[in-house]
Amino acid sequence: MLTFHDLACAKGERLLFKGVHCTLERGAWLHVSGANGIGKTSLLRLLCGLSPPATGEIRWDGTPIRTLGDAWRRQLLYIGHDSGLQGMLSARENLRLLAQLAGFHPSDAQLADALGQLGLAARAELPTRFLSQGQKRRVALARLVFSTAPVWVLDEPFVAIDGGALKLLSSLIAGHLDRGGLAVLTSHQPVEIGAHPGRTLELTR
Ligand SMILES: Nc1ncnc2c1ncn2[C@@H]1O[C@H](COP(=O)(O)OP(=O)(O)OP(=O)(O)O)[C@@H](O)[C@H]1O
């Protein structure tokens, strides 16, 4: 279970938000919404332990994540809105690298399967600087096919992808929830994840 209580986030002198609460059981997902610049990405970064909250506490199964350190990071798959690809490396090489940085060691077959599911089989060996924006996004999202991390934190995962990839992404998240995972994502659009009713947290000033 992921809980956060009375969270506030400051950037320099500016308080972005305060008093943010949520409890997410396994199998649940949260849609974080709000205007540009309100602090959605900043909230995801707090949840991942990449920066500390100004006030409040984030707990995983009752333990503050600040005391879990690497043990918390091993629970996580974080995909930021920058796809984080190295343009000189192929889709397959990027996918392997991104997975390894997150502590996964996919086999060649898993990499091929993930790229195939994302419709990238014919582009797998091409340097990613030659891919379209949507194809780059698909490479970043391909990690979801083999990730076993229980907590998925996805910043704007639906941006730049077409209807087919959107359906696939939604079904990958639904499968993750069915297996007892949980997900926190941001989107400026309404999101449906199969039959899983999501919760919405709208950040406001
Ligand atoms: N390291 C930083 N130093 C100063 N200000 C920052 C820093 N990081 C983010 N900000 C500011 O914090 C605010 C919130 O940024 P954030 O990226 O969390 O917003 P967001 O809600 O995700 O926006 P968008 O919908 O446009 O992606 C913005 O005004 C941004 O400029």
Image (cartoon, grey):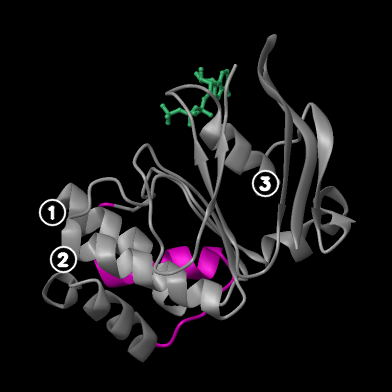
Q: Is residue 96 magenta?
A: yes
SS type, badge 1: helix
Q: Residue, x 56% and y 65% (percent of image)? A: 102
Q: How far is the residue under mark 1 from the one under mark 2?
A: 7 Å
Q: How far is the residue under mark 2 from the one under mark 3?
A: 34 Å
- The answer to whether residue 107 is visible is yes
With 32 as the anchor, is 43 left or right in this view? right
- Mark 2 touches mark 3? (CB < 8 Å): no
Residue lying furthest top: 13
> Does label 3 or label 1 sit earlier along the sequence?
3
Which mark is in front, 3 or 1?
3
Image position, residue 198 (x, y; %): 52, 56
SS type, badge 2: loop
- Name which quarter of the figure residue 63 lies in: bottom right
Q: Nearer the viewer, residue 176 or 115?
A: 176
With 178 as the anchor, is 5 left or right in this view? right
Q: Quadrant of the N terminus?
A: bottom right
Image position, residue 164 (x, y; %): 18, 65
How crowded pointer 2 is (Cα within 10 Å; few <14, some 14-19, many 20+) is rated as: some
Q: Residue, x 45% and y 71% (percent of image)? A: 174
Which mark is in front, 2 or 3?
3
Highlighted magenta segment, given as a residue range: 87-107
How crowded pointer 1 is (Cα within 10 Å; few <14, some 14-19, many 20+) is rated as: few
From the image, tell me which residue sits under label 2.
Answer: 126
From the image, tell me which residue sits under label 3.
Answer: 47
How crowded pointer 3 is (Cα within 10 Å; few <14, some 14-19, many 20+) is rated as: many
Image position, residue 132 (x, y; %): 14, 51
Q: How far is the residue under mark 3 from the one under mark 1?
A: 33 Å
How many marks are shown on the rendered structure? 3
Q: Nearer the viewer, residue 2 or 124?
A: 2
Above or below 73: residue 204: above
From the image, tell me which residue sits under label 1.
Answer: 130
